[in-house]
Image: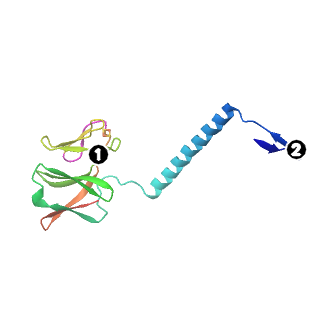
Amino acid sequence: MVMDDGSGQKASKTIGRREALANISLLGALVVLGAGVVNAFVRFIYPPRRGVQGAGDEIEVGPVANLAIGKGTKFFADGVTYWVLHVDDGFKSFNAKCTHAGCIVEWIEGSRYFKCPCHGAQFDANGNVISGPAPSPLVAAATIVKGGKIYLKG
Ligand code: FES
């Protein structure tokens, strides 16, 4: 690096390897810190939905006749994967994202529970945790049946 020492003469300084690595580490730490601050700000402005969803528009899933009791269908809308179930007490919908680390859970039709392929969490047909490591139930979506069709509100 060439520096001007104010006397009109140029002085050169070589940055050592350790100093360069320290600068790179500091820069990396600042980038990570900055990303965390931006993420916290965005989550403050647009908080993630928790609990039962249903503030959005109705999304048509399909005819009731296509979903027999015990069956589930995976449905993708607005960037979200849902499971829509027909169980003994009616139709239910859940965000398919596991509450542990966000993997998409699978509906085990024969046994009527959800299983996460990533770390094995299990949820019952109401979205409640049967076994960990998931810390909380699946997020339910409002499910509406009208005119022979199933709708959900994401
Ligand atoms: Fe589902 Fe870990 S992401 S159990």
Instruction: Report the residue that reaches farthest toward the right.
Output: 7
Residue at x 18% of width, y 46% of height: 125
Q: Is residue 15 left or right of residue 127?
A: right
Quadrant of the image for the C terminus?
bottom left
Q: Quadrant of residue 18?
A: top right
Question: CA–CA distance between discs 2 and 1?
Answer: 65 Å
Quadrant of the snapshot with the N terminus: top right
Residue 22 occupies quadrant? top right
Q: How many marks?
A: 2
Name above or below for residue 22 compared with residue 47.
above
Label ID, residue 9 = 2
Q: State which tag comes first along the sequence, 2 or 1.
A: 2
Tags 2 and 1 touching, CB below 8 Å? no
Q: Quadrant of ligand 1?
A: top left
Q: Residue at x 11, y 57 (%)?
A: 66
Within 10 Å of the Cα at label 1, are there few (<14), some (14-19), or many (20+) other Cα atoms? Answer: some
In this rendering, the answer to whether 61 lies above or below 130 is below
**Mark 2 Cα-neighbour bin, 10 Å: few <14, some 14–19, many ≥20:** few
Q: Identify residue type, mark 2.
A: Gln
Q: Which stretch is magenta? A: 125-133
Image coordinates of residue 89 in percent, x first then y, are: 12, 52
Q: Residue at x 25, y 65 (%)?
A: 58
Percent from the top left, x then y, of residue 39? 48, 51
Query: In front of the other: label 2 or label 1?
Result: 2
Q: Main secondary structure of the magenta part?
A: loop
Q: Position of residue 6 (x, y in %)?
A: 87, 47
Task: Check disc 1 and give the amino acid type.
Answer: Ile
